[in-house]
Image (cartoon, grey):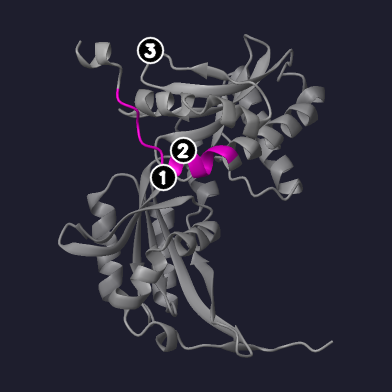
Amino acid sequence: MNLGSLRRVPLREVWSSESADFTPWLAQEENLKLLGDTLGLDLALEATEQQVGPFRADIVAKDTTDGSFVLIENQLERTDHSHLGQLLTYAAGLSTVTIVWIAERFTDEHRAALDWLNEVTAQDIGFFGLEIELWRIGNSPAAPKFNIVSQPNEWVKTVSKARSETPLSDIQQLQLEFWTAFKEYLLEQRSPLKVLKPAAQSWTSIPIGRSNFYVEAVIRAKESMVTVQLDLYGSDAKGHFRRLLQNRTAIESAIGQPLAWNERPDRKTSAIALDMHNVDASDHSRWPEIFAWFHTYLAVFEKTFRPIVKLLTPLPPPDDESDA
């Protein structure tokens, strides 16, 4: 076989300026997705060159899983104390934030500083350090590669948080075991789905690229069923729901099943759901069946709704509602 050889490409050969070249490149949807895939986050761009206190963050994004901020600071050379100070300023000014520092090379002391920050800061603040590389095979276009050099120690923080909380009930313990096993199932299946970190609750969710829209898997123990649903939140939830309802036939055709359309007039959320009946999630012998069903329809819902909600605009309320 005739194999090519990898050649390292200097960053400045492609991006001569951080602000004029690299930041606009990274802010593009497909490149922000590449970064998000590396971090295990689903990122949606909020702004570039955004003011945060006395500094301007290169990129401000949101993790669509929980709506928290992700601040990204870029360097096309090795890390320095000035940028570290900016990161600390960002962390001090926001209560829930993920901070991402991208550089050509991390010095040992700055890598150690991020590791220390991840140990001592609150669970709602995390620091990532990434080195960016460019590689080329022959005359091919240069290809970017992110390498994580520091990341939040979620296990340590989870254990610390658990020690400060009351013990789990039997139901909560079962829920935690169920979602932990489900996440392991997805890993075994090499699934691209990104579910939340397992927690002692009746649901988990996956992001679909826009805040206030989530595809969720839900255990409904009292009704002896499980559900996959699109949940809509926020002030425009009802308008978005009515807009989707206009395309009910096409959506149900894409899902391959009739769906339950729950506007929930008395609540701030709406949902479009598919149920699996007569299942007991406490029966471990049924877990493989439930996991397979969740996996199938979470993927179908994500594939169907992701491109729709990205461009979705809310439908105005009926005349009688707007006049009320």
Q: Position of residue 242 (x, y in %)?
A: 41, 23
Identify the residue at horizontal 55%, vertical 47% (top origin).
155
**59 with respect to 135 (left or right):** left
Q: Say whether marks 3 and 1 touch (CB < 8 Å).
A: no
Mark 1–mark 2 distance (CA, rounded to whole Å): 8 Å
Q: Secondary structure at mark 1?
A: loop
Q: Is residue 116 above or below residue 109?
A: above
Q: Tell me which amino acid carries mark 1.
A: Gln
Q: Which residue is mark 2?
A: 161
Q: Position of residue 185 (x, y in %)?
A: 73, 41
Q: Which residue is mark 1?
A: 123
Q: Between disc 2 and disc 3, whose residue precedes?
A: 2
- The answer to which of 240 and 15 lies nearer the viewer is 240
Q: Is residue 192 above or below residue 80?
A: above
Identify the residue at horizontal 51%, vertical 29% (top origin).
247
Q: Is residue 171 magenta?
A: no
Q: Is residue 320 above or below residue 188?
A: above
Q: Nearer the viewer, mark 3 or mark 1?
A: 3
Q: Between disc 1 and disc 2, whose residue precedes?
A: 1
Magenta span:
304-316
Identify the residue at horizontal 62%, vertical 25% (top origin).
175
- The answer to which of 166 and 247 lies nearer the viewer is 247
Q: Tell me which amino acid carries mark 3.
A: Pro
**323 with respect to 64 (left or right):** left
